[in-house]
Image (spheres, rainbow, N blue to C red):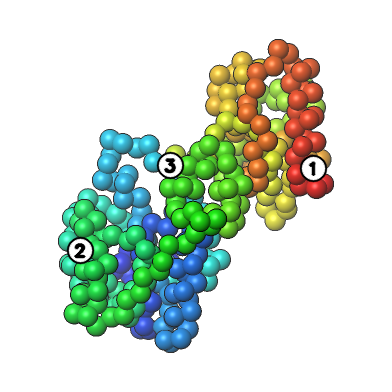
């Protein structure tokens, strides 16, 4: 996959089969569009192109409302797009000035004159241009005017529910990880760095790695205990992860900490990836550390049963 950091960097000498959007999460619906693009590119002797935007448009257009969290960081999205077989990814800096471009001008100046669109593939609910006023009906007219092909992809459904980034964000935010993972067609993950904690877990036989997620836009699941897969470099492990304030230890500090099964190496400072398979229970407060330890033993057993290990 070739990467471009602006529209101006893209100077194709092939037939671009293009789609556009933020593609947060690269979920089942996005995957269907990408697969269709790759099929058309092969049939038409072209190459598949995604024009995406960063930061997310809502963060630029509504600076006073920064409540939106994203399923994937930009790097995580790149990884998923690479796996899809996408050939060209253009990441355009999204600014207020860019957002003011009228839909007809966007098609003429960006898609036609700059990107040399041969065929445009869009999702069922796609809107574009200033105030998102550009519609599919307008695109039909502009495609005829500028002589490019156009195709609209119907809604992708799972169990009769339309798949969308918003639905997936809501599932993750409430801890419904198995549902979110079905919509994503892969396992939701966080990437971070292992940082020092207070080592209290070691005193009860459950040492944990404290994870710092540096990207402030990354969506973090709701508090609770999760069955997870852990990746350190090329090695994969199983574990259980807690998100919350650790009320039994009276920390009152929001933490993400993972206990890796059958693991004792020192990994402070290491990069870590955690994949969320299932939420096991709510975060609870216990009267003493012995009761907490007994619960953690139950949690470990439940996680291992889930993973069949």
Residue under numbered circle 1:
305
* Residue in view at x 47 percent, y 62 percent: 156
Q: Residue 61, located in which quarter of the rendered image?
A: top left
Whole-percent x and y of residue 39?
48, 79
Whole-percent x and y of residue 264?
79, 38
Whole-percent x and y of residue 261?
78, 40
Badge 2 marks a residue whose secondary structure is helix
* Residue in view at x 63 percent, y 26 percent: 283
Q: Earlier along the polypeptide chain: callout 3 or callout 1?
A: 3
| Residue that lies at the very extreme toward the front in this rendered image | 160
150 left or right of 249? left
* Residue in view at x 52 percent, y 71 percent: 85
Whole-percent x and y of residue 152?
36, 70
Choose mark 2 or mark 1, whichever is in front.
1
The crowd level at tag 2 (other Cα within 10 Å; few <14, some 14-19, many 20+) is: many
Q: Earlier along the polypeptide chain: callout 2 or callout 3?
A: 3
- CA gap, disc 2 to disc 3? 27 Å
């Amino acid at each position: 996959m070739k990467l471009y950091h602006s529209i101006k960097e893209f100077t194709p000498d092939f037939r671009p089969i293009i789609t556009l959007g933020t593609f947060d999460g690269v979920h089942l619906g996005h995957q269907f569009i990408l697969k269709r693009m790759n099929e058309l590119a092969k049939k038409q002797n072209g190459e598949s192109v995604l024009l995406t935007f960063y930061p997310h448009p809502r963060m630029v257009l509504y600076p006073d409302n920064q409540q939106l969290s994203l399923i994937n960081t930009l790097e995580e999205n790149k990884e998923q797009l690479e796996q899809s077989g996408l050939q060209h990814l253009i990441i355009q800096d999204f600014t207020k000035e860019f957002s003011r471009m009228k839909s007809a001008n966007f098609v003429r100046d960006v898609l036609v004159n700059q990107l040399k669109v041969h065929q445009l593939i869009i999702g069922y609910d796609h809107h574009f241009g200033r105030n998102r006023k550009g519609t599919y009906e307008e695109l039909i007219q502009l495609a005829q005017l500028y002589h490019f092909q156009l195709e609209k992809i119907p809604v992708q459904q799972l169990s009769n529910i339309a798949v969308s980034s918003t639905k997936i964000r809501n599932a993750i935010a409430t801890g419904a990880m198995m549902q979110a993972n079905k919509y994503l067609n892969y396992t939701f993950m966080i990437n971070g760095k292992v940082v020092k904690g207070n080592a209290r877990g070691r005193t009860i036989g459950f040492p944990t790695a404290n994870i710092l997620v540096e990207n402030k836009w990354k969506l973090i699941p709701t508090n609770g205990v999760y069955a997870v897969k852990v990746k350190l470099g090329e090695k994969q492990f199983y574990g259980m992860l807690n998100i919350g304030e650790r009320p039994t230890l009276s920390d009152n500090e929001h933490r993400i900490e993972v206990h890796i099964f059958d693991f004792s190496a020192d990994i402070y400072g290491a990069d870590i990836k955690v994949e969320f398979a299932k939420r096991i229970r709510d975060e609870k407060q216990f009267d003493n550390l012995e009761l907490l330890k007994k619960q953690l033993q139950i949690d470990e057993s439940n996680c291992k049963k889930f993973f069949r290990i």
